[in-house]
Image (tube, rainbow, N blue to C red):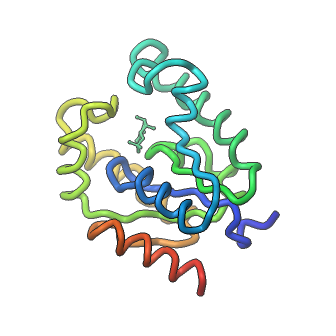
Amino acid sequence: MSKKNKTRICIIGMPGSGKSTIGSLLSEKLQYRFIDLDHEIEIDTGLKIKEIFKNRGEDNFRKIETAMLQEMIVKDNVIISTGGGTILKNEEILKKSYNILLHCELSDLIKRASRNKNRPLLSSNVENKMKDLFNERKDLYNKIADLKIDASTNITKTVKDILNSLES
Ligand code: S3P
């Protein structure tokens, strides 16, 4: 199945860009199955993402993440909200899907992430760490994105913008 068929969609982008919320709303509109990759990992391992990082380390998390993505990405009529770092090790696998990049201003990402204590890579010094992640990843996101959407404003508008772009 070609990724251009848009029946297999991955939502990619930085932590705090709204991947899970927007992916879920989009799946309702398109009547696709919604999969949140981190959530699937938590169900499968019986551990919270931050526990996996703490007990097993990031490398191990990345292996689990790749295995889960590989398992999920073969399905059709599906929207997968990836984790912010999924792009790091999975460029090849992501070529199998139509990838929507949610773009947010760094300042908004920092504000949002400062309110959430569940991100192991952003548990302290959020501003600097977010900047580092952003700089390290922005080219990768852009390279793999089939569609780039501004997700800095409101969620309803972002979902509408995506739907309009998917139809055109
Ligand atoms: C990560 C982002 C998280 C989660 C894990 C690692 C990252 O997902 O997968 O904590 O490397 O940026 P969100 O982007 O949903 O926060």
The quadrant of the rendering that contains the N terminus is bottom right
113 displayed left or right of 12: left
Q: Residue 67, how many percent across, how many down?
A: 67, 33
Q: Is residue 84 above or below residue 159?
A: above
Q: Residue 156, how many percent across, how many down?
A: 36, 70
Residue placed furthest toward the right: 1
Residue at image coords 58%, 46%: 35
135 displayed left or right of 19: left
| Residue 140 visible in image | no
Residue in front for this viewpoint, 18 or 15: 18
Q: Residue 157, how many percent across, how many down?
A: 35, 75
93 displayed left or right of 114: right
The quadrant of the rendering that contains the C terminus is bottom right
Q: Residue 18, how many percent across, how many down?
A: 37, 55
| Residue 18 visible in image | yes
Residue at image coords 56%, 30%: 41
Residue placed furthest toward the top: 55
Residue at image coords 54%, 68%: 29
